[in-house]
Image: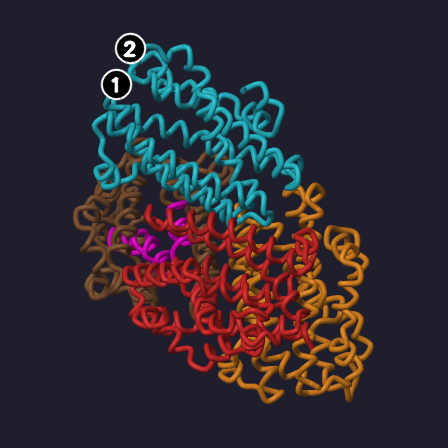
Chain colours: A cyan, B red, C orange, D brown
Amino acid sequence: MTDALNAGLFGRLRDGSGVLWRDYVGHPFVRGLADGSLPAAAFRRYLTQDYLFLVHFVRAYALAGYKSTRLDDLTDAASGMAALLAEMRLHVAYCAEWGLDEAAMVAEPEAVETVAYTRFVFERGTAGDLLDLHAVLAPCIMGYAEIGTAAAPHAVAGNPYAAWIEAYAGAEYQGAAGTAAAALDRIGARSGAAGRMPALQAEFDMAVRLETAFWDMGWRAGS
Amino acid sequence: MTDALNAGLFGRLRDGSGVLWRDYVGHPFVRGLADGSLPAAAFRRYLTQDYLFLVHFVRAYALAGYKSTRLDDLTDAASGMAALLAEMRLHVAYCAEWGLDEAAMVAEPEAVETVAYTRFVFERGTAGDLLDLHAVLAPCIMGYAEIGTAAAPHAVAGNPYAAWIEAYAGAEYQGAAGTAAAALDRIGARSGAAGRMPALQAEFDMAVRLETAFWDMGWRAGS
Amino acid sequence: MTDALNAGLFGRLRDGSGVLWRDYVGHPFVRGLADGSLPAAAFRRYLTQDYLFLVHFVRAYALAGYKSTRLDDLTDAASGMAALLAEMRLHVAYCAEWGLDEAAMVAEPEAVETVAYTRFVFERGTAGDLLDLHAVLAPCIMGYAEIGTAAAPHAVAGNPYAAWIEAYAGAEYQGAAGTAAAALDRIGARSGAAGRMPALQAEFDMAVRLETAFWDMGWRAGS
Amino acid sequence: MTDALNAGLFGRLRDGSGVLWRDYVGHPFVRGLADGSLPAAAFRRYLTQDYLFLVHFVRAYALAGYKSTRLDDLTDAASGMAALLAEMRLHVAYCAEWGLDEAAMVAEPEAVETVAYTRFVFERGTAGDLLDLHAVLAPCIMGYAEIGTAAAPHAVAGNPYAAWIEAYAGAEYQGAAGTAAAALDRIGARSGAAGRMPALQAEFDMAVRLETAFWDMGWRAGS
């Protein structure tokens, strides 16, 4: 997937973010997932906050729907919402395997890092246009695809995080990330992306930093 | 349906709008639909603008999704979007029976009246909260239910508008309107509706006036 | 002013709107202002709706403030709000000369045409970015400057609309329009305007059409 | 000031937030400001992020302007923006005394905590109504007034933070906080505040937590 993505706007933004991107996809939390050494407490903290995060992620797709003026974009937003709501059901089932029940997750206060990334997405999504919104969602969607692909060889018996890795390395998620990258290119092309790279890069970079902070938040719970 | 709706917030707002409501649901355009006397040119104008309107109506549900902080409201918004997108397919098929093809409708400029109502909904939906948004969608959703019920006895063989009447008088649409009324009550209850009636009534009234203007726009095309 | 404006993004959009622009700046209402033949009833209708319009225009600058990420744009938005609020005081004084008092204007329902243009501006301003917002404000700001300049030779003794013409033909308003055109160019340059002309032209054209509809609304009150 | 504030909506929300409020106004950072023991590095970190914060705070007032439908609220928003922009000039001058120049502050990335509070304000301000927006601004505006009043006796010669304390304990800031509390009451009264306390309390509490996190961020820079 990475090769195809590199050809487009996402690849350009990812390369432009340089060390910020490497800090994100190579975070100790991610390495701990890959080699199975991540403390369970860190993963549980992450899972709970990721549940809270997902609610806002669905809202971000809804916001994309409002911002759409073309029926295809609007249909994509509706499909994205439906897919994420379905994913939340899977997430809840997976969390239960880790001893986390939905009511407890709902009752958990959002971490500062969860607030920061999700509301930053909304701010760019309300103050900017549809391209700005997609630009700050991209580090999440495509970053997890890259992380999943890189960790895939480690999704072996005995790794407690194998199922998580397989979910993001799998064809379904990889396909969704590819679709998102194509949408970013399509929206970028008609939104003058080439002429607004400094602003796009700045907001993409901030989103990447906030994703890294999200790993930090989980990581701290394991120490 | 009318009786049940009257018990809640919608009924209170409808009654509060008085003659504005009666002008809307008893518009000559509506009477012409019921007795079959509406000029076809008026109906075609209406159908085309209604198609353009529906795109924005899906966006309004998307905006409701963004504004939702509870998973049930968010799920409702996603379902509403999916249902409306499906309805648009039916609408397109129905328009084809009247000699209107989708490409031609897309190419038609929005009438001032179409712009006025749809963007007023968005303004209340972005400047106000979820209750404000639902309050200005209600005249459309519930008004069509009332119009459909009232016209149902006229949906007879020979009335060229029988299929239109049946669609809105039918159980599916009536059920959807009832669900929307229940949602308005539920959101109203936790959003302090009782303490903000003057503002809610004012925006509801404006929405009713803009619905009437929408009929005016169709009506003029028949003269 | 016109020559300088023609060199930039506004000039390109204005030329692109072609006959729509000519219909707007050459509307019978405008010609009636210039030659003094406009019925007073038409002008009073216009003045009242323009008062209601101005409240939303201040809000549009506020929205521009929210959408600004640079201190200079934010400061411009604050200055614009303060200037418009001051202009509203002048407008109220001027309306009083025509026998319209503020309380009566506040109590007047907004015309469909007033709703349409103002809420369209808000929709583009919330669904699009800062450039989209400025693109749909431009027809109003710069159009009035062009109308004022064209009518200036007619601001003679005996023309009841001389003061109105002088206000828009005057150095202060012309300067403000020039500043707005420069801001559009500056924001356009960093927002990739060159790569998004079809969308910008489409929303500019709609704004022009809605300005024309606003004149229509006043004009009808004189017949 | 505290007594007057306690009588209204702000007092009710403050009391409702309980220990969260006490953690905020009694944070070690705040105690260090009062007794002069706060490490200068912590203060400088705070000053820089507070500068970045203020830009968004002006934007929040702009958003309040967009959300206003009454001329008095709109005028308040414009005045608030102008006052904050003036305050930023003072802030820059004050920062210079601490060896921080504006260009360096602009170049500093926003801390996660700065992003979290400011974007949370925007989210509540775009997803909720004007009351929601004011409810999440209140902890900042009124909290600083309470902190200033409590620390005022410590604004003595030799305390390096005396000027900071005096600014927030002074009549001008206290008056502004009182005005903001009155506005919250006024907007609350017509927005049904009494019927929506759980939601208002929840968002107020989150804002308080994010203010505490902002102090944490400064505090860590001193250790």
Tell whether C222 sits left or right of D99: right
Q: Which residue is drawn at 34% across and 74% down?
A: B12
Residue hosting label 2: A158
Quadrant assignment, res A194: top right
Provide the major secondary structure of the magenta segment. helix
Q: In which quarter of the image is the C terminus of chain A?
A: top left
In depth, the one of C200 and D113 nearer the eye is: C200
Type of residue at label 2? Gly
Lower sequence index among marks 2 and 1? 1
Find residue D36 and report its horizontal and vertical position in percent. 24, 40
Tell whether C71 sits left or right of C30: left
Q: Crowdedness of circle 1 by 10 Å Cα count: few (<14), some, many (20+)?
A: some
Q: Crowdedness of circle 2 by 10 Å Cα count: few (<14), some, many (20+)?
A: few
Local secondary structure at mark 1:
loop
On whether residue D146 falls in the magenta region, the answer is yes
Identify the subunit bearing mark 2: A
In depth, the one of D30 and D212 nearer the eye is: D212
Work out whether residue C197 can be spotted.
yes
Residue hosting label 1: A39
Q: Quadrant of the N terminus of chain A?
A: top right
